[in-house]
Image (tube, rainbow, N blue to C red):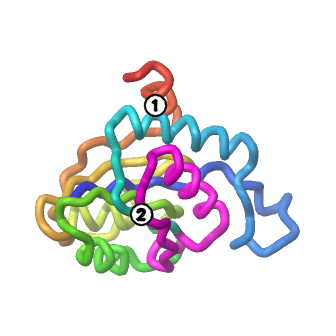
Amino acid sequence: MDCALMRHGIAVERDEWDGKDADRPLTDRGAKRVVQVAAGLNWLDVQPAHVLSSPLIRAIETAKIAHSLLRVRSALQIVDELLPDAPPDRLLSILHDLPPESCVLCVGHEPQLGMAASVLLSGRASASFPLKKAGACLIELAIRAKPGRGVLRWWLTPSQLWAIGKRGG
């Protein structure tokens, strides 16, 4: 299984938003950056069979853009396991239930995504693997998702993904 972890794009700042934090949307710049990043993911041949998103609006908007541009056939799934404070092992339980030959794109937040990457790669949760907004990584899981069994294929910033998509590699 290939597991791509992607952080949501640039959202409206908390101090500029009057509503609930869960409802903060992407900025126009954030949405544009996600489009650019999706072009990079496409060039890197990321072909998700499943797209999972946190229920927070900024993540859903990011996931919808990626879902559309990567031409994913299955429905977008909203899961609490990608909330910012969700324990990383909860995401592993979802990954464990997916077909082992599939590719999944998980769109969420820090610190949860970095912690999940840490668990997949090293077997324990650590804050040593943060993703930038609209950044992504690809972790290969040769067997069903188990802590410490992942192999890092790439870890890229949004600027690197944009450059890959713009130049075609």
Badge nearest the viewer, 2 or 1: 2
Q: What element carries label 1?
A: helix
Q: Does the magenta stretch include residue 73?
A: yes
Name the residue beneath numbered marker 1. Answer: 160
Q: Residue furthest front?
A: 73
Residue 163 left/right relative to 99: right
60 displayed left or right of 7:
right
Residue 50's x, y, as percent? Answer: 37, 62
Quick one: label 2, few (<14), some, or many (20+) residues within 10 Å?
Answer: few
| Location of residue 93 in the rendering, given as x and y in whole percent from the top left corner | 29, 80
Residue drawn at (31%, 62%), measured in percent from left and top?
Answer: 118
Query: Going 51% across and 50% down the picture, which residue do you hit?
Result: 66
The answer to whether residue 94 is above or below residue 30 is below
Please give the residue where the numbered disc 2 appears in the rendered image: 74
Position of residue 53 in the picture relative to residue 21 (left or right): left
Could you say which quadrant of the image residue 92 lies in?
bottom left
In front of the other: 66 or 75: 75
Type of amino acid at the residue the image marks with label 1: Gln
Residue 156 on image: x %, y %? 40, 39
In the image shown, does 39 or 6 lie closer to the viewer?
Answer: 39
With respect to residue 124, does 107 lie above or below?
above
Which stretch is magenta? Answer: 54-83
Q: Residue shown at 12%/59% (left/top)?
A: 142
- Circles 2 and 1: CB atoms closer than 8 Å: no
- Which percent across, then down, holds residue 65? 58, 50
Tell me the CA gap for discs 2 and 1: 28 Å
Query: On the picture, is 104 further left or further right than 79?
Result: left
> Which quadrant would the C terminus be assigned to in this image?
top left
Circle 1 crowding by C-alpha within 10 Å: few under 14, some 14–19, many from 20 = some
Please state which amino acid type lies under the numbered disc 2. Answer: Ser
Nearest to N terminus: mark 2 or mark 1: 2
